[in-house]
Image (cartoon, rainbow, N blue to C red):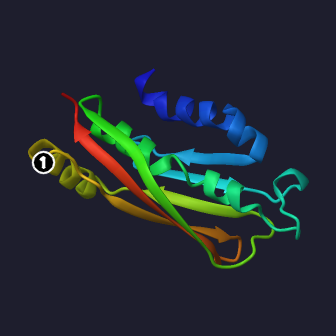
Amino acid sequence: MRRYRHHLFRWVLNLWPPYFGAGIHVRSVAPDFSTVEVEMKLRFWNRNYVGTHFGGSLYAMADPFFMLILIQQLGPGFVVWDKAATVRFKRPGRGRVRARFHVPPAEVEVIRSRALSEPKVEPVFTVEVKDDEGTTIAEVEKLLYVRRKT
C-alpha cells in the first residue's frame, strides 16, 4: 500500500471540496512527493466578471503544494506551515492553466539540516501558473515556516 500512497494523495486532493468546486485537478504526484502537477480549465463557475480565470482560483491552485511536499519529504519530526504568499498576475488566464511544483531532494536536505540546527527556517518557493502555450499567467511566491517538533 505504501508504494501507492501518492495515488491516494492525488485522489483525495481531487475530491477535496474547494478543489473539486473550483475545477482544480491534481494531474500527478511523484512517488517520492517531490513534484506535483495541477491544472484548471476555465469554466463558468471559475470565471471572473470579464470572463477570465478568477484570481482566487488561480491562487487556490497554488496554495498548499509546497507545504504538502515538505510535510511529506521531511516526515513527522517537523512542523511545516504556510506563512505568507504573494500573487503577481501577469496576463489574463483563458482556457486551461497549469502549475508544476517541485522541491529538489538537495533543497529538502538543506531545509532539514537548518531546521535541526536553528529554531526555525523560512524557505521561499515560487511557482509559475502557465497557459497551454507556456505563457506565464501568474507567479505565486510562498513563504513557509519549518521547525523541528519539540
Q: Which residue is mark 1?
A: 118
- As drawn, the residue found furthest toward the left would be 117
Between 3 and 84, which is closer to the camera in this rendering? 84
Q: Residue at x 80, y 66 (%)?
A: 95
Residue at (16% x, 44% y) in the render: 119
Q: Is residue 131 left or right of residue 149?
A: right
Q: Amino acid at mark 1?
A: Glu
**36 sits left or right of 106 in the view:** right
Q: Quadrant of the N terminus?
A: top left
State how many labels appear. Answer: 1
Q: Position of residue 6 (x, y in %)?
A: 49, 35
Q: Is residue 15 left or right of residue 21?
A: left
Please report the residue visible at 68 percent of the width from the left and 46 percent of the height from the top: 25
Q: Residue at x 77, y 64 (%)?
A: 53
Q: Is residue 49 above or below residue 12?
A: below
Q: Position of residue 100 (x, y in %)?
A: 53, 60
Q: Residues within 10 Å of mark 1 (few under 14, many from 20)?
A: few
In front: 91, or 49? Answer: 49
Image location (x, y in percent) of residue 138 = 61, 71
From the top left corner, tell me how far across and down residue 146 is, in percent.
Answer: 28, 45
From what the image shows, is residue 87 above or below residue 69?
below
Viewed as shown, does residue 7 lie left or right of 54?
left
55 or 104, nearer to the observer: 55
- The image shows residue 146, relative to residue 17, as above or below, that is below
